[in-house]
Image: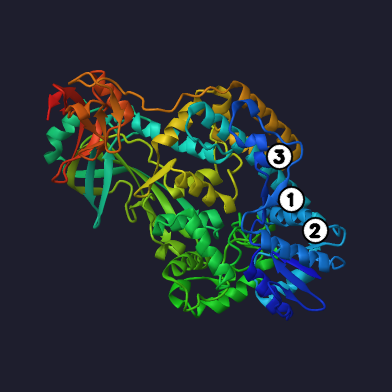
Amino acid sequence: MLILTEKPSVSSAFAAALGVPKKAGFFENDEYCIVNALGHLLENFAPEDYDPALKKWSLQTLPVIPEQVKFKPVQGAESQLALVKKCFDARKDDVLLLATDAEREGELIGAEILGYVGFRGYDSARRFWVSAALTPDVILAGIKNARPLSDYDPYKEQGYARQEADWLTGMNLTRLLSVKSGKLLHFGRVQTAVLAAVHDREQAVKGFTPEKYAEAAALLDAGFPFSVKLLNQSNEEFPSRFPDQSPLLAEIKEKKDSLKSGRITELKKEKKTLRPPQLFNLTALQKEASKKFSYTPEQTLTIAQALYEKHKCLSYPRTPSRVMGDENAGLVSGIYENLKGVYPEMSEGTDPALISAGNKRIFNSAELEDHHALIPLAPLPDGASPEEANVFNLVLNQFFTILMPDFVYNAIKIAVDISGFPFAGNGAEVLQAGWKQRREKDDDEDEEENYAGLEEQGVYPVSSITMAEKFTEPKKHYTYASLLALMENPRGDDGKHLAGLGTPATRGSILKKLTGRGYLLQKGKNILISDDGIFLIENIKKNEFLANFISIPETTRWEQSLHENTAQFLRDIKTFVRSAVEHTSVETWGKKSLGKCPRCGGDIYDGKRNYYCANYKEGCQFAIWKEICQAAISLTDVQALLAGKKTKIKKCKSKAGKEFRAAFELANGKVEMRFDDKKI
C-alpha cells in the first residue's frame, strides 16, 4: 500500500502505527510506502507561464482566461515533489491510500499531486478521513474503514473550481485595478468582500450623529437594591428614553425628594431555560481566543494545529461542526472519565448522564459536517507553551461546560407606581445556576438584575431617584471576533442567514492577507481600514457591477453556487471577469487635495498623523491633527472644516480624563471646539 500524507508529522504517525522503518525522506517496507507532501507542492501557472508576453501588466492582454488550467511546482518544493513522484513510480502497482487532511483543501492538495505524477489507479484508491488525533489505534481504524477515493470527488471538484475562480478574479482584477490606478491594488473574491464590510462599518461609525436623550431611574430597597426606569409611553422602541426637554422629566426632577415609595402594580414571570453553549468548531474557538487573549485567527489555528499534531491532546482543529456524531457517545464518555480526575475543578458540576446518544445538543449526525467538533483527547503535556495551554483550556472548559445542567430562570417584568409616576424594569430570578455558575460573563453580555422575591402589590421604599443625560451610540468597530462571526454567519439585508464566507480553515488566512497587505489595521481590539483600503473599496464601489460582486449577499451567493454546480459557477465567474475588464473605471492614485489652507491658500493633504498644508516648506504651519482630545478627525471631517462647516458632535476626553462631547470648527485658521454653539 502506498500512503500519501500532507505533512511529515502525519507520515511519522502512520509509520509508528504500522511499524514501517524510515528511509531517505520517506518510510518503507515490503507492505507499505509512506511519503508526505508539505502542504501545497503545486500552484497555478502564472500568466507568463502560459505566454511570456503576459509577464508585462497591460490592459490590452486582459482578461487572461486559460483554456486549460496548468500547475507547476511551488518554488522550494521541487525536491519533495520529485521524492513523491519517485515513490509513486516505484510502487505503481500498490493500492493508494490518500491521507491528506480530511477537508476540501486537503482533497485538492492530494488531487494536484495525483495529477502531476500521472496516477492511474483511481478505481482501487482509498481515502483516509478521520477527525481524531492520529494515535496508533485511530490510524489503524481509519485504514480499515477507508472508503473509495471516488466518494470524495465533490470535494475535489469544489476545490479545483474555487482555486480557479480565485485565480481568475484575483489575477485579472488585481492587474486591471493596478494598471488603471497606477498603484498596486489586490483583489480577492472573498477577501475584498470582507474589506468592503469593514469599510462600510467604519463609514457608518464616522457618519453617525449622536442624539441626546435622558433617562430617570429609581433605586428601591427590598432587602436588596433593585432599579426601575421612568416609562415613556409614547416611545415604543426605547420606552425609557425621553427627549431632553421632557415636561415629565422636569416634573420628576422637581419632585424627586418627595418620592418615598413605589408599589409594584404588575409582575409577570416567564420561566426560561438556557442550554450550555455547544462544543467549539474552529471559528468559535478563534472568536473566543480573540476575546480572551487577543490572538489573531491565524495564531489560534497554528496553536490548535500543534495541539493536534505535536501534543495529540486535541481533535482535528479545522472543523466546521459544533456537534459529535451519534456514534461518538462512547468516545466522549472515555475522554470524560480520563480528564475529570486530571482537572477536578473544571469538571466540578458536570453530569455524566448527559453523555448519551439521545442528547442531540452534543450528538447529532444530521448536523455533522466533515469532522466532529473540537474536543480535548488527553491531558495537556507538561512541555506545552503558555499559549498552547490557553487554547487547550478554552476547548477543555467548553467540553466540561456542555456536560453541565441547564441555566434555568424566571424572566421578570415589573411595572411600578411611584407617586403616580410610571416606572418599569426587567430582571431575573435564578432557579438553577447550572453551567453559568462558573462561566465568566462576556464583555458584551448584559447581566440581568436580580428581581428574586419581589411581589405584585408589594410596596418598597425609594432609596434614590437619578437623572442621566445620554447619547445614542453607533455600531462598534469590527474586531477579529466579530469579523469571524460575520464570515461564518452573514446575513442579507432582510436579516436572513446566508452561506458562510470562506471555510473555517481559510478565514484566518483571509484576514491575515488583508492585514499583511496593509488594507486592515489593528488598533487595540478594533480592526480598521487603512487609506489604501479605502481607496480600493471606494474605486470598486464606483463601478456598479463590481460593487455588487463584493457585497456580502452576492459573495455568499457565489459560495452557494460553488457547492451546487461547479461547472456553472466557473462559467459565471469567467463571464463576470470579461465584463469587469470591459467596463471598470478607476481613479488615478495620487495625493488628493482635501481643500484649501485657510491661512495661505495652499492644498491640504492627508499625512501620517495630521492633515497638512502643501506650503509647509515655505513656512505655513497650518495643520489639523488626526486625533484631538482622543476624538478621531476623519477625511470627511477635514473637508467639512475646510468648507467652513462644523463637524458632527464627537466623544472627547480631557487631559484630566474627563469625558465630554463637542463639535469642531475652524476659526481664524485654528481648530476650535463647540458645545451648545459656544466656544470651549
SS for dot 1:
helix
Q: Is residue 7 above or below residue 544?
A: below
Name the side, left or right, on which 246 lies relative to 209. Answer: left
Within 10 Å of disc 3 (Cα), the crowding (few <14, some 14-19, many 20+) is some
> In the rendered image, which residue does mark 2 sit on?
149
Residue 303: give x, y in percent of width and height.
50, 64
Would residue 276 be visible to someone looking at this image?
Answer: no
Whether residue 536 can be seen here: yes
Who's the residue at 26% across and 26% down the image?
A: 614
Residue 437 occupies which quadrant of the picture?
bottom left
Q: Residue shown at 30%/46% (left/top)?
A: 457
Seen at 49% across and 59% down, the residue is: 300
The residue that appears at 44% across and 36% down in the rendered structure is 533
Tell me, for residue 156, which label it has, or none. Answer: 1
Hey, what amino acid is under mark 3? Tyr
Q: CA distance from mark 1 to mark 2?
A: 10 Å
Badge 2 amino acid? Leu
Mark 3 to mark 1: distance in Å?
Answer: 24 Å
Q: Earlier in the sequence, mark 1 or mark 2?
A: 2
Give the Cα distance between marks 3 and 2: 31 Å
Front disc: 3 or 1: 3
Q: Earlier in the sequence, mark 3 or mark 1?
A: 3
- Left of 352 or right of it: where is 615? left
Q: Nearest the camera: 258 or 500?
A: 500
Tag on residue 551? none
Expressed as whole percent of the image width and height from the top left, the position of residue 309 reads 59, 69
Q: Mark 3 — residue?
A: 50
